[in-house]
Structure formats: C-alpha cells, structure tokens
Amino acid sequence: MEANTTENKKVIFSGIQPSGDLTLGNYLGALKNWVKLQDQYECYYCIVDLHAITVRQEPKNLRAKTLELLAIYVAAGIDPDKNTLFIQSHVPAHSEAQWLLNCNSYIGELSRMTQFKDKSAKYTNVSAGLLNYPVLMAVDILLYQTDLVPVGGDQKQHLELTRDLAQRFNGAYSETFKIPEPYIPPTGARIMDLQEPTKKMSKSTENPNGCIYILDPPEVIRKKIARAVTDSIGVVKYSDEQPGVQNLMSILSTITGMSYDEIEKKYEGKGYGDFKKDVAEAIVAELEPLQSKVKELLADKKQLEEIYSKGAQKANYVATKTLRKMQKKIGFIPVSR
Ligand code: AMP
Ligand code: TRP
C-alpha cells in the first residue's frame, strides 16, 4: 500500500490518552484546531492507549474509553478519509522503537521531567512506564517524520526532549529522524476552571462543577455555567480583575466568533444572568450535534472498526519504514525474505 505522503504536505502528529473524560478545554483548545489543520497538513491523530496504562486502568473502562475517544474525534469533524486516525497499540512499531530509543535515553533526563516528578509524587508504586512515558511520546512523533506537533503547554518539555533524543540518535547513527517543532495554534484559547478561574480547566480536577465535559448533557452544562464563579462588579467586561467573566467571554468568543468588544456591547447595562444564559446556550448548541454523532457512532461499532483498521494500516506502513531504518542503523540483521 502506498503511503499518503506524496503531496509534500507537512506532517502533523498529535494524540490524546483514552483515560478520563475530555473537557470543553480539550475540545476548544485541541480538537477544534485539529479539524482546521486537516486540509493543509498530513495529519496523524492517535489514541494513545499505551500511554494510558502508565497508571492502572480498568480493562473494561479502557476499551470503552478508547472507542469513545475515536467516536469523539470523528464527531468533532476529523475526517477519517483525510487523516490517519488510529489506536497506538495497533502499531507495534511504537513499542519496538521505544526500546531502541530507551537505550539512547538517560535516567537523569527522564527523571527531571516535570510531569514525571508531579505524577511520581502522587502514586505509591511508580511504574517504569511512567518514567519512560516521554520516550514513547518521542517515538510516536518521530516514527512519522513529523514536522509539527500541536500540544498544550504542559507537553512542551516532552517535545523538547523529543528533539534532544532525535538529535542524539541522528548524531550517533546518521540522519534518521526529522526534528519536529511545536505547533502553536493562532487562536489558542485557554479555557479556565469555572470555579477557580485562575486555574486551567482540566479533566483531573477535583471539583467537577469547575469543568464541563464534552459529553455532559445540556441540563448539566446549563447548571455548571449558572454556578460559574464571577464577581460582584456586575459588568460584562474583559478585565484581569474579572477572571471568571473573562473566561466565560473567551468561551463565548471561541464558539461564536464574536469579539470581546462585541460581547461587551451586547451585554452593556445587563447583569450576568442573560450573559451566562447565552454562554450556556452557545456551548449546548456547539456540543449537542457532536454528542448525538458520538452516540450514533458508538451504536455502529462496525463503522468505528473500519475507521481504526484503515488507520492502523496506513500508520503501520509509515511507522515500520522508520523502525526498519532505525534497526538497520543500529546494526541489527534484517530477517531474510
Ligand atoms: P490534556 O487533557 O491536558 O492532556 O490536554 C490535551 C490537549 O487539550 C492539549 O493539546 C491541550 O492544549 C488541550 N487542553 C487541555 N485543557 C485545555 C484548556 N483548559 N484550555 C485549552 N486547551 C486545553
Ligand atoms: N502526552 C500527551 C498528553 O498527555 C499525549 C501524547 C502521547 C502525545 N503521544 C503524543 C501528544 C504525541 C502529541 C504527540 O497530552
């Protein structure tokens, strides 16, 4: 099968773990941008199930969340015919190449990663997988000769490490990997927690009222927005003194395309009630079609199976090519055909 890389488009790779529930932050900050990239770039969007098991997952739940995440990708508008949508564990080259790159990574640099330090402080039995997590992420990116990686701020350090590991390998064994760059989307809205608007909205939050999940039913969304923390100033204004209002404005603006000026004018002389209602309705209008599409897809497992099988085939072709290159350069003897 021919790889779909003949058009000389730049390659994008990104992935989300099928653990926890995706938030409005993930949707507006990541998925919605991925959709915009699909015409201009050759995109690989992965469901990183190997990453998810760095902490213990309930098998039944992992299966369900993996399919749900694929359904969310498709429902968000990521076209499986234009992009390579695949499940990481379907491409064995990721695990194989990770060993090779592990042997070229240092415990020192891995244990200095902020995410490792945070997570290893949180769990009692810290798995070796948690330490090696960024090496697997590096392999994800490097196997596809990726140019650009859309990631949030917390993953920038891992991308830096990816570049270091790639350069080290290239230096030791000659040019093998393209050196990837981070991709910062032009309109990267950072959605904040509804209860603590100075903190990023995150799926690992302790207070679920602070966080809207992509699959929250409309009445839950309305309730969470109604309860969102604002202030006693009572004026809809984009001001640093009003982080709660600022956050709601940024949500409304990202969804509707209205500017902050337009929003301020629209709610001049009105309290927060009308404004919050409109924010809630905008979110509901944005997420409801996605939710029904997710339901439809999850009811038709055959269609999902076709999508991930096709994705795995494409991904395997490209990833195996890079893996063979690595093996050859390291000095492994190819199996005779
Ligand atoms: P995470 O859920 O932190 O693993 O992030 C997955 C992707 O969603 C990353 O690309 C983040 O940039 C994006 N993301 C997560 N939370 C937010 C947020 N509150 N606002 C904007 N983007 C977010
Ligand atoms: N580590 C990323 C996160 O938690 C997920 C991820 C795994 C990823 N492999 C990747 C992101 C490759 C971008 C590219 O968000």
Image: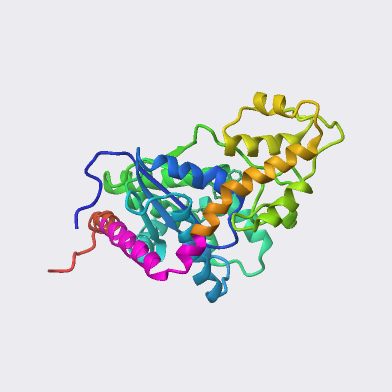
Q: Say which quarter of the image contains residue 250.
A: top right
Judged left or right of residue 184, residue 236 is right
Relative side of 256 to 319, left or right: right
User: What is the quadrant of the C terminus in the image?
Assistant: bottom left
Residue at the right extreme, as displayed: 232
What percent of the width, then of the height, locates residue 288? 57, 53
Query: Does 304 lie within the magenta span?
Result: yes
Would residue 281 appear left or right of 236 to someone viewing this image? left
Query: What x and y, as percent, mark residue 241?
Result: 79, 30
- Res. 48 in view: yes
How are the residues colored? rainbow
Which residue is drawn at the image coordinates 45% and 60% (left, top)?
Answer: 70
Q: How many marks?
A: 0
Q: Residue at x 75, y 36 (%)?
A: 245
192 falls in the magenta region? no
Write the residue at 33% across / 52% down: 143
* Quadrant placement of the N terminus: bottom left
Q: Left or right: 260 with respect to 29?
A: right
Q: Which residues are magenta?
A: 294-317
Query: Which percent across, then down, holds residue 41?
Result: 35, 40
Q: Principal SS element in the magenta part?
A: helix
Q: Quick check: 243 above or below 46? A: above
Residue 107's spot in the image, x, y percent? 51, 56
Closer-to-camera residue (14/169): 14
Q: Quadrant of residue 8?
A: top left
Q: Is residue 49 visible?
A: no
| Residue nearest the viewer, comparing 273 with 335 | 273
